[in-house]
Image (cartoon, helix red, strand yellow):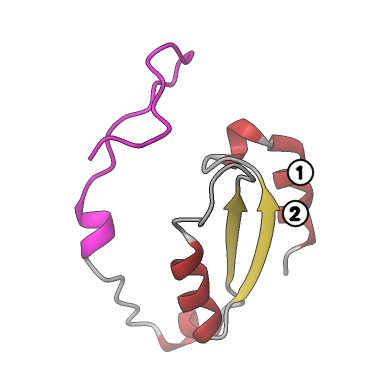
Amino acid sequence: MPPVWADSTARIPKDVPQPLKTLTDPLILTNRSARRLPTTYILTEEPAQSPDPFAPFAARAASRGWRVVRMEAGHVPNRTAPIPLAALLERLP
């Protein structure tokens, strides 16, 4: 499944297709203590993109008790907003 942000002119590393099973196969946690770890969903939002295609996933995360943090950035914030992303990650528990 080609990523929507793929840019053939990007410098290395080049974007590669997303394995489909990462979207269809559930994550199964067998260690009960892992379920108690603090969890945060970072919803990156692009002002020009409305509605946000990832908003339903953020809502699902919130319904499961996860903290949801919104930041203005492209889907790959380590490329589109690396400094704000690093600052956000430093503030998380």
Q: Quadrant of residue 68?
A: bottom right
- Is there a contact, CB below 8 Å, between mark 1 and mark 2? yes
Left or right position of 69 against 17: right
Characterize the local packing of mark 1: few (<14), some (14-19) or many (20 or more) Cα atoms within 10 angstroms. Answer: some
Residue 73 in the image: above or below residue 65: above
Report x, y in % for residue 31.
38, 83
Q: Position of residue 81 (x, y in %)?
A: 68, 37
Q: Which residue is mark 1?
A: 84
In the displayed structure, 45 sits above or below 65; it is above
Q: In the picture provided, is 70 more to the left or to the right than 2? A: right
Rendering coords of residue 29 (x, y %):
35, 78
User: If the image is split into quadrants, where does the N terminus sit?
Assistant: top left
The amino acid type, in three-letter code, at marker 2 is Leu
Asked whether residue 23 is drawn in magenta, I would say: yes
- Label 1 secondary element: helix
Q: Is residue 93 magenta?
A: no
Point 53% across, 52% down: residue? 50
Which label belongs to residue 48? none
Residues under labels 1 and 2: Cα distance? Answer: 6 Å
Residue 14, placed above or below residue 25: above
Q: Which residue lies at the image location 72% right of the left edge and 69% below the top edge?
A: 93
- Determine crowd level at label 2: few under 14, some 14-19, many 20+ residues with C-alpha closer than 10 A: some
Query: Is 34 left, or right, of 73 in this rendering?
Result: left
Give the residue at x 34% y 37%.
3
Name the residue located 21 percent from the left edge and 50 percent from the top edge.
Answer: 20
**Range of residues picked out in magenta:** 1-24
Q: Tell me the SS state at disc 2.
A: helix
Three-letter code for the amino acid on which mark 1 is drawn: Pro
Rendered image: mark on residue 88: 2
The part of the image, by quadrant, that contains residue 73 is: top right
